[in-house]
Amino acid sequence: MATVVRELVAHDVSLICEANFVAESVVFRDLPPARIAQVHVSAPPEVLRARLLDRDPHRHPVHYDAEAADEIVALATAGKWEPLPLGGELIRVDGTRPLDLDELTNLVRRV
């Protein structure tokens, strides 16, 4: 993924990278100059845990939400998924309230 991201950025191609990235992720290391908008969605650990436990247990087996809930809460509490040190624009989204997609789209377009 890191190679693809670097190639696309080097060729001035817009892209979206979505995942639970951490500061140590190699995906964003040594990027060519680019305009960056980071959308960081967060919620309190207790909200994350409740949502993980409430998810449909019949989802694809790759989604082991209930089994991972305590680990995910511990990592979130430890600050593992704080915004990345990317520079550019940081847009924080409160994951405890409904997301206004038009509002978010307008914020990202301003970058």
Image (cartoon, grey):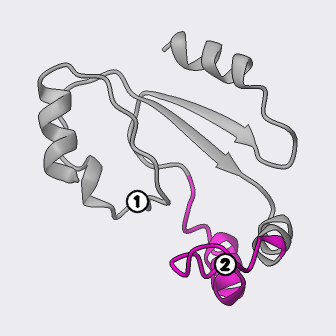
Residue in the picture at 70% in, 78% down = 58
Q: Amino acid at mark 2?
A: Asp
Assign a secondary structure to mark 1: loop
Sequence-wise, the earlier of marks 2 and 1 is 1
Residue 109 on image: x %, y %: 53, 12
Residue 111 on image: x %, y %: 48, 15
Residue at numbered disc 1:
23
Crowding at dot 1, Cα within 10 Å, few <14 / some 14-19 / many 20+, comes out as some
Task: Inspect this view and state whether residue 32 appears.
Answer: no
Q: Is residue 26 above or below residue 49?
A: above
User: What residue range appears in magenta?
Assistant: 54-82
In the rendering, which numbered label is found on residue 65? 2
Residue in the picture at 34% in, 64% down = 24
Q: Amino acid at mark 1?
A: Ala
Left or right? Give the position of 93 relative to 36.
right
- Kindly report the distance in space between the C-alpha atoms of the residues bearing marks 2 and 1: 23 Å
Q: Is residue 84 above or below residue 56?
A: above
Q: Is residue 104 above or below residue 64?
A: above
In the rendering, which numbered label is found on residue 34? none
Left or right? Give the position of 98 relative to 63.
right
Residue in the picture at 42% in, 27% down = 88
Labels 2 & 1 near each other (Cβ < 8 A): no
Residue 77 within the magenta-colored segment of the rendering: yes
Q: Indicate the quadrant where residue 98 lies.
A: top right
Assign a secondary structure to mark 2: helix
